[in-house]
């Protein structure tokens, strides 16, 4: 999950929404990374979820193919990168 979050941060740093929207490969990669995070988050035990609260603002509940603007907002404003 940390690796996926690191890649999300790398893929979204220094770009704006218009750049993101115009780059199909980047958008598809980011959707796949979120899916991977969601799958990994769903595999975490409930006890660990309660203890850590996932640091991902419940991204495992994101739609599989969300609207591009909603996904962009989630990527830029809800994913907290923390390597601890």
Image (cartoon, grey):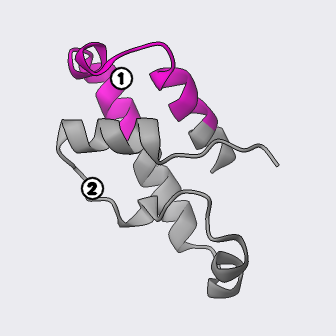
Q: Position of residue 12 (x, y in %)?
A: 46, 24
Rendered view: 62 above or below 9? below
Rendered view: 58 above or below 51? above
Q: Residue at x 77, y 43 (%)?
A: 83
Q: Residues within 10 Å of mark 2 (few under 14, many from 20)?
A: few
Residue nearer the viewer, 73 or 42? 73
- Most extreme residue toward the bottom is 47
| Numbered disc 2: secondary structure | loop
Q: Main secondary structure of the magenta part?
A: helix
23 vs 35, left or right, is: left
Q: CA distance from mark 2 to mark 1?
A: 16 Å
Question: Circle 1 sits on which residue?
Answer: 26
Q: Residues within 10 Å of mark 1 (few under 14, many from 20)?
A: some
Q: Residue at x 36, y 67 (%)?
A: 61
Q: Residue at x 29, y 13 (%)?
A: 19
Span shown in magenta? 6-31
Rendered view: 32 above or below 36? above
Q: Position of residue 22 (x, y in %)?
A: 21, 15
> Magenta stretch containing residue 11, yes or no?
yes
> Magenta stretch containing residue 50, yes or no?
no
The answer to the question of whether label 2 and label 1 lie on touching residues, with beta carbons closer than 8 A, is no
Question: Circle 2 sits on which residue?
Answer: 64
Residue 6 is drawn in which quadrant? top right
Q: Residue at x 26, y 59 (%)?
A: 63
Q: Position of residue 9 (x, y in %)?
A: 55, 30
Residue nearer the viewer, 14 or 47? 14
Q: Earlier in the sequence, mark 2 or mark 1?
A: 1
| Numbered disc 1: secondary structure | helix
Rendered view: 50 above or below 59? below
């Amino acid at each position: 999950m940390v690796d996926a979050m690191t890649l999300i941060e790398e893929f979204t740093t220094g770009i704006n929404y218009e750049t993101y929207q115009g780059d199909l490969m980047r958008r598809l990669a980011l959707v796949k990374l979120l899916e991977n995070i969601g799958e990994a988050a769903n595999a975490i035990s409930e006890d660990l979820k309660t203890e850590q609260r996932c640091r991902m603002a419940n991204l495992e509940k994101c739609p599989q193919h969300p609207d591009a603007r909603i996904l962009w907002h989630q990527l830029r404003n809800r994913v907290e990168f923390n390597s601890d």
